[in-house]
Image (cartoon, rainbow, N blue to C red):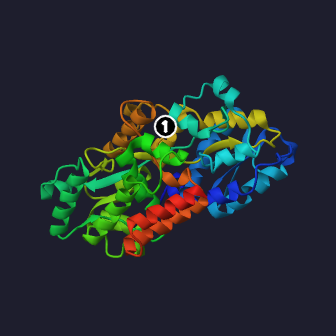
C-alpha cells in the first residue's frame, strides 16, 4: 500500500463523520433478502485487485467452515467516507464493515449510535488484542470495534550504503545531521522526502515531535494541556526547514509525490526514507540492498516510533444478522487470520503472534517484534500520528503549514502559531 489509512492520507474522513452529527440510530434491517446466514461486508477498495481476490479466497475458508455466506463489497475511500453514515442510518448498509479507529472514525460512529457495543463479545470470544490498541476503539468505557493493523512511522535506511560510507545507525539528531552531511558529500540525497500531497507532512511532524516530547508530551498537546506553538513544536518544524535548506531533501520536496520519493530510495539515489511500516512488503520486493528501520532520533538520544492503527471491523447497529456478524468478526480477530495477513499483506496485527512460525523477511520480523514489544506495554515509549487524533481544520493547517515551511513561505514559528489557532477552534 502507498500509505496508511491511519497516518494521514485520509484525514479528511474525519470531517464527514464528525459534522454529520451524533443524533439518531440506524433502524434494524432484514437486508440480504432475509437470509440470516448471509451478511454484507464492506471494505475500502484495495489498490491491488489481486489482494481483494486473495482476501475473498481466505474468507471462503470461513464460509465453508461456518455455513455463513459473506458478500464482500468495496468502495473507493472517498466514496465510502461520504456514504457510510447514510448507509448505516438507512438500515440497508453493510452488516460488518472495515473502518478506521480513533475518535474521528469509529469513535464518531459509536457516538452516533451506528455501531454495536462489542464489550461482551470481547469477553465471550476472548479476543487477544493489545490494551493500547483497544483504547482506540473504546468510547465511554465500551468497546465498539476490533482494531486494525498496527502501524509505525520511522526511518528506513540503506544499510549497504551506510556501511560503504562508514556511517553508523543514527542515535540522535546530531548523528542524523552528521550522516546527512556525509551522504550529501557522496552525491546522494540523505532523506527521500516528498510532500506534494500534503499528508506526508503530517508524518514528518509526527515522528520528529513524538521523539522530542514522548507520548506524554503528545497527549498533553491533544488534551490542550500544552500549546502547539511551544518551542518543541517549533523546533520539530524547523528541523525539516533546515534539512531542506542544507540540501538534505530532494529538490523542491513539495513537488515530489509519495511514489517518486519511494522510487528515489529503491534506486539508491536516496539513502533514507521517512515513512511507515506498511512499506516493508514493497521494500522486500523492490530494494536490491539490505534495509534497516529506526525511530526518528530524539534531540539527545534514540527516539521513539510514532504509531497508530489502521482499519478494523465494526458491526452495524442496524443489522438483524448479529449472530452471523459476530462469528465473522471473531474470524477476523483470530490469531490465524492475523498470521495470514502478516504473510499475505505484510500488516502488523494488534495481537501477540509467534513470529518464529511466520514466513517473513528479517526486516519485517524486526518490525513485528519491535512493534509488538511496544504495543504490549513493554519497555519503551510509543508516539502518535497527529492527524487521526485532530480535527479536519487542524489537519488542513498542519498539511499547509509543513508545505509552507518547506517552501520558505512561512517560518516554523508562524506555522506553530497557525496550529495553535486551529487547535483552539
**Looking at the picture, how far across and down is residue 187, in whole percent?**
18, 71
Q: Position of residue 34 (x, y in %)?
A: 87, 43
Residue 365: percent from left, percent from top: 36, 40
> In which quarter of the view is residue 367 placed?
top left
Residue pictured at 35% horizontal, 67% vertical: 263
Q: Position of residue 54 (x, y in %)?
A: 56, 50
- In the picture, residue 269 is in which quadrant? bottom left
For this view, does 418 lie left or right of residue 121? left
**Res 161 visible:** no
63 horizontally vs 46: left or right: right
In the rendered view, tell whether residue 18 sits above or below residue 374: below
Write the residue at 24% across / 70% down: 246
Which image quadrant: the C terminus?
bottom right
**Numbered label tally:** 1
Q: Is residue 55 visible?
A: yes
For numbered disc 1, what is the local secondary structure? helix
Q: What residue is drawn where x is 48% and y is 44%?
A: 220
Q: Is residue 251 left or right of residue 258?
A: left
Residue placed under numbered mark 1 in the picture: 339
Q: What residue is shown at x 33% (from left), y 59% (from top)? A: 273
Foreground of the two, 253 or 63: 253
Q: Nearer the viewer, residue 272 or 337?
A: 272
Is disc 1 surrounded by few (<14), some (14 to 19) or many (20+) residues within 10 Å? many
Amino acid at each position: 500500500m502507498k500509505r496508511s489509512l491511519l497516518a494521514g492520507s485520509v484525514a479528511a474522513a474525519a470531517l464527514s463523520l464528525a459534522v454529520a452529527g451524533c443524533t439518531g440510530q440506524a433502524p434494524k434491517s432484514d437486508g440480504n433478502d432475509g437470509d440470516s446466514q448471509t451478511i454484507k461486508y464492506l471494505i475500502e477498495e484495495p489498490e491491488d485487485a489481486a489482494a481483494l481476490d486473495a482476501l475473498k479466497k481466505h474468507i471462503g475458508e470461513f464460509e465453508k467452515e461456518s455455513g455463513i455466506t459473506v458478500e464482500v463489497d468495496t468502495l473507493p475511500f472517498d466514496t465510502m467516507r461520504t456514504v457510510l453514515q447514510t448507509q448505516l442510518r438507512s438500515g440497508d448498509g453493510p452488516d460488518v464493515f472495515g473502518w478506521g479507529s480513533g475518535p474521528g472514525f469509529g469513535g464518531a460512529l459509536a457516538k452516533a449510535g451506528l455501531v454495536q457495543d462489542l464489550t461482551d463479545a470481547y469477553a465471550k470470544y476472548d479476543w487477544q488484542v493489545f490494551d493500547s490498541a483497544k483504547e482506540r476503539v473504546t468510547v465511554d468505557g465500551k468497546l465498539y470495534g476490533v482494531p486494525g493493523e498496527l502501524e509505525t512511522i520511522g526511518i528506513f535506511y540503506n544499510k549497504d550504503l551506510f556501511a560503504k560510507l562508514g556511517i553508523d545507525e543514527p542515535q540522535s539528531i546530531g548523528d542524523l545531521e552528521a550522516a546527512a552531511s556525509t551522504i550529501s558529500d557522496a552525491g546522494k540525497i540523505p532523506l527521500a522526502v516528498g510532500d506534494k500531497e500534503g499528508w506526508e507532512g503530517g508524518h514528518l511532524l509526527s515522528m520528529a515531535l513524538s521523539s522530542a516530547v514522548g507520548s506524554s508530551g503528545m497527549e498533553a498537546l491533544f488534551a490542550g494541556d500544552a500549546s502547539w506553538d511551544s518551542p518543541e513544536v517549533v523546533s520539530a518544524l524547523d528541523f525539516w526547514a533546515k534539512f531542506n535548506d542544507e540540501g538534505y531533501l530532494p529538490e523542491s520536496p513539495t513537488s515530489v509525490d509519495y511514489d517518486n520519493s519511494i522510487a528515489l530510495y529503491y534506486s539508491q539515489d536516496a539513502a533514507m526514507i521517512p515513512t511507515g511500516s506498511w512499506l516493508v512488503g514493497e521494500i522486500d520486493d523492490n530494494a536490491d540492498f539490505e534495509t534497516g528501520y529506526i525511530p526518528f532520533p530524539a534531540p539527545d538520544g534514540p527516539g521513539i516510533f510514532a504509531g497508530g492503527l489502521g482499519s478494523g471491523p465494526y458491526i452495524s447497529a442496524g443489522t438483524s444478522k448479529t449472530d452471523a456478524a459476530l462469528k465473522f468478526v471473531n474470524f477476523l480477530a483470530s490469531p490465524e487470520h492475523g498470521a495470514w495477513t502478516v504473510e499475505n499483506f505484510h500488516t502488523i496485527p494488534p495481537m501477540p503472534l509467534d513470529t518464529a512460525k511466520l514466513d517473513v523477511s528479517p526486516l519485517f520480523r524486526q518490525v513485528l517484534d519491535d512493534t509488538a514489544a511496544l504495543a504490549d506495554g513493554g519497555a519503551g515509549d510509543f508516539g502518535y500520528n497527529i492527524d487521526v487524533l485532530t480535527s479536519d481544520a487542524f489537519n488542513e493547517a498542519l498539511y499547509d503549514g509543513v508545505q509552507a515551511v518547506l517552501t520558505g513561505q512561512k517560518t516554523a514559528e508562524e506555522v506553530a502559531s497557525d496550529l495553535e489557532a486551529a487547535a483552539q477552534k
